Image (tube, helix red, strand yellow):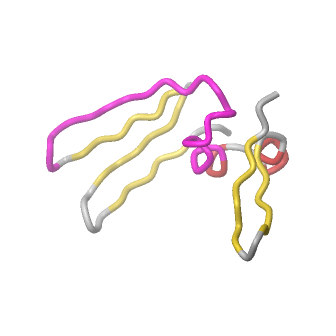
């Protein structure tokens, strides 16, 4: 349901939340939180977030991975 909570312990502790189209990252070493409003599902930097919060079918509408010249490449569809 478009929500997640992720806590990383090592190498640097961080906690991430995603709710209501907002990604919040808390860094306890800096005692700082940053937030980013997520507007476009076509932003390639959001692919990991989409995989964690969405269904695979919606992800595949905007991205695909192909094997070309002995390497995998990410194809991004801007429609």
**Residue found at the very far bottom of the displayed protein:** 70
The quarter holding residue 12 reads bottom left
**How many numbered marks, from 0 up?**
0
Q: Which of 46 and 73 is in front in this view?
A: 73
Note whether 45 is above or below 13 in the view shown: above
Is residue 63 highlighted in magenta?
Answer: no
Task: Please report the residue visible at 78 percent of the width from the left and 67 percent of the height from the top.
Answer: 68
Quadrant for the N terminus, please: top right
Q: Which of 53 and 63 is in front in this view?
A: 63
Q: Position of residue 5 (x, y in %)?
A: 47, 47
Task: Please report the residue visible at 20 percent of the width from the left and 36 percent of the height from the top.
Answer: 32
Note whether 66 is above or below 31 in the view shown: below
The quarter holding residue 44 reads top right
Note whether 13 is above or below 68 in the view shown: above
Quadrant for the C terminus, please: top right
Q: Is residue 74 left or right of residue 36?
A: right
The quarter holding residue 41 reads top right
**Residue found at the very far front of the displayed protein:** 69
Task: Please report the residue visible at 66 percent of the width from the left and 51 percent of the height from the top.
Answer: 51
Q: Where is residue 63 in the image (x, y as percent from the top left)?
A: 76, 47
Q: In this view, does 61 lie to the left or right of 31?
A: right
Task: Please report the residue visible at 69 percent of the width from the left and 33 percent of the height from the top.
Answer: 42
Residues drawn in magenta:
29-50
Q: Where is residue 67 in the image (x, y as percent from the top left)?
A: 79, 68
Q: In this view, does 29 lie to the left or right of 74?
A: left
């Amino acid at each position: 349901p478009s929500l997640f909570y992720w806590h990383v312990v090592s190498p640097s502790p961080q906690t991430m939340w995603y709710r209501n189209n907002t990604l919040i990252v808390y860094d306890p070493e800096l005692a700082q939180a940053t937030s980013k409003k997520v507007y476009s599902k076509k932003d390639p930097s959001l692919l990991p977030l989409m995989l964690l919060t969405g269904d695979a079918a919606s992800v595949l509408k905007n991205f695909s991975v192909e094997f070309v010249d002995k390497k995998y490449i990410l194809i991004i569809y801007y429609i």
